[in-house]
Image (tube, rainbow, N blue to C red):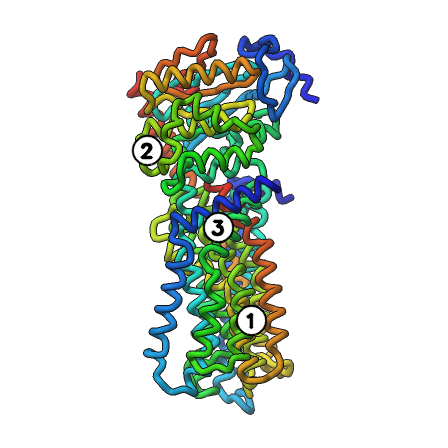
Amino acid sequence: MRGGDTGCAHDAFGYPTLVGYVRPMTAAAPVSQPLIKASGLALSRGGRTLARGLSLAAGPGGALVLTGPNGSGKTTLLRALAGLARPEAGQITPDDRGEAIAFLGHAEGLKPSETVIATLQFWAKLHRAAPGSVEAALRAFAIAHLTERSCGHLSAGQRRRVALARVALSGRAVWLLDEPAAPLDSRGRALLAAAVARHRAGGGVVIAATHEALDWPDAEVISLASALESAA
Amino acid sequence: MSALAALFARELRLSWAGGGGAAGPAAFNLAALTLAPLAIGPSAETLAAAAPGVIAFALLLSALQSAERMFGEDTADGTLELYALAGPGLALAALVKMAAFALASLWPAPLIAFFAGLAYGLSAEASFALAAGLALAAPGLVMIAGFAGALSAGLKRAGLLIALIAAPLQVPILIFASGAGRAAAEGTGLAGANLMMTAAASLLALVLAPMGAAAALKGRLE
Amino acid sequence: MWSYFANPGRFDGLARTLIPWTAGLTVVLFAVGIPWALVVSPPDYQQGETIRIMHVHVPAAWLSMAAYAGLGASSFVYFVWRHNLADLAARSLAPIGAVFAALCLLTGSLWGRPMWGAWWVWDARLTSMLVLFLLFCGYIALRVAIEDERLAARSGAVLAMAGLINLPIIKFSVDWWNTLHQPASVIRFDGPTIHASQLWPLLVMTLAFTVFMVTLVLSLMRSMILETRAIALGRAIERRAEAEARR
């Protein structure tokens, strides 16, 4: 099938299969194969080229941190990886990755009239998550006391935690997070780092766009600023 | 299937709790039906002749009235992106969403139509034919309004645009549904044929509009 | 062959050579058709001189329908293959089709006054044309409302395809509505029996309007290509300035 992928020299994959593989992954891939891979990407927004010749790959346990100044195309790249935006050129594989992706954008997709628990239970049902995953996600982001609160009455940081809990309970292998830590306090960031570590230990992939430092061990940093320079 | 059922349940709950459910469209429908005779005049004959058209038209307006909300909010709050990645695909998600919306917001419409028909001086038989026509028409009208809503989601003055886009596409359903009431009132024996045509046009909208809405929404995400 | 001309530069060259010819042909055809239709051809035994309105009304009706068919077809091509040229064709056809539909409605109303004794009659053909006019208006309004060029093109394509699928159903439903609930009009526009003395000038006028429309579409598409080029040039200059500023 995608035999050509195995020869790619990136340090983000080639991690050994990991212990504590709790949840079944939607897209189970062989160890040596990246869960998501992009090559020769060119991105544009509103008819403007943002980056050209961008390549990346992440295998089980891998983490990529996309950095760069405002307007450098971090969000556009994440959306392209999710399959929400179409790159100008280049390829992203696998084609059927949509089913393996959990996405967190700028907008959290929370409904003001819906309670936290109803929101998470809905997403759990939609993703056919294992029983108990809602409770686990509530614990992971320390929001168990908010369950009966409606999403319209949450602070920005609390909203982000609920959205992250939604990502965590999806059981999907590839997490694409846009500025996941921006509105979080120090406790929230620690919880996020722990959840990311757990997901990676379970064989998942995390790709985050951020303009601030995230202390995730062994995460490969990809700077989009240089790609922007080369496009200009 | 269970994913779609979960989606349907959520959308039903959301348009019930957050959007006020059927109260808004029903109140709008009643207000229009109260004002129309005041504009037309009290002549019983004129009113009865105008009844099927006026009642069908009031339903069409109330279906358009809340179409802006259907995809506008999802586009703004990021829900659309999540639905696009959720698994069933955007077309099915759009179908389920619009169906839930139609049920939650327009379920009283046939009842209102029946009693309005009686109040306007139609026979019980004609009122029933009209109500049946509108019950068949409502899903199709909502689907077309939703398609227009998907095309204009997030735009300024989306409400106006929706009305302009949806109006020509809703012509067949409006004709057949009001035709059922008129045929029954005039005793031409064509009420059944009109009902069949209403159902056919509504079904076609049920199939095509979600695909169109998905194509429009996908373009919006890119 | 299509992919050969799908290149905007090549199309621009082709259009530049074609436009003088089609424009010239338009002038010649109108020079023959207008006097023939308005002066030379005999008045109708039933409708009298008003029959002459038909020589504008009927071509306008046909061409607005042809324009919508073209709009739907080029929208389909754009939606599937994303040829920008197809979108340019759609974008140029819409206002032209709308104007022809409006012309058809206006002449229909003028003709209706002496014939039916009313400026407007809910005749099936005229009503269908009115709905077609609304379809054009919706398409244009949607494109104007969306700022992002690519999104406007895509949304417009989806709407035009939906309209094209619906058009026969709308036509059928309007005919159904009209024949079942109103007596058929006594005098119709283009009945099956049209005398040869009327048919020939009508054909010439139709041909003239068709070539006229082709000329308009080609010129509009050309001006849009030039506009796109100018915008791209402006962007390149802007980008260079940005790069300089960063240095």
Please, is residue C204 above or below residue B88 in the view? below
Please, is residue C233 above or below residue C195 in the view? above
Badge 1 amino acid: Phe
| Residue B176 tag number | 1
Please, is residue B6 above or below residue C133 in the view? above
* Protein chain holding label 1: B
Q: Are marks 1 and 3 in contact (CB under 8 Å)?
A: no
Image quarter where the N terminus of chain C lies is top right
| Residue C156 tag number | 3
**Residue drawn at the location 64% of the way across and 80% of the way down:** C192
Label 3: few (<14), some (14–19) or many (≥20) C-alpha neighbours in 10 Å: many
Mark 1 secondary-structure assignment: helix
Badge 3 amino acid: Gly
Q: Percent x, y for residue B192? A: 62, 75
User: Can you tell which of label 1 and label 2 is closer to the viewer?
Assistant: 2
Mark 2 secondary-structure assignment: loop
Residue lying farthest to the right in this orientation = A1
Image quarter where the C terminus of chain C lies is top left
Gap between marks 2 and 3 measured at Cα: 38 Å
Towards the viewer: A128 or B152: A128
Camera sees residue C213: yes
Q: Which residue is mark 2?
A: A154
Residue lying farthest to the bottom in this orientation = C45
Label 2: few (<14), some (14–19) or many (≥20) C-alpha neighbours in 10 Å: some
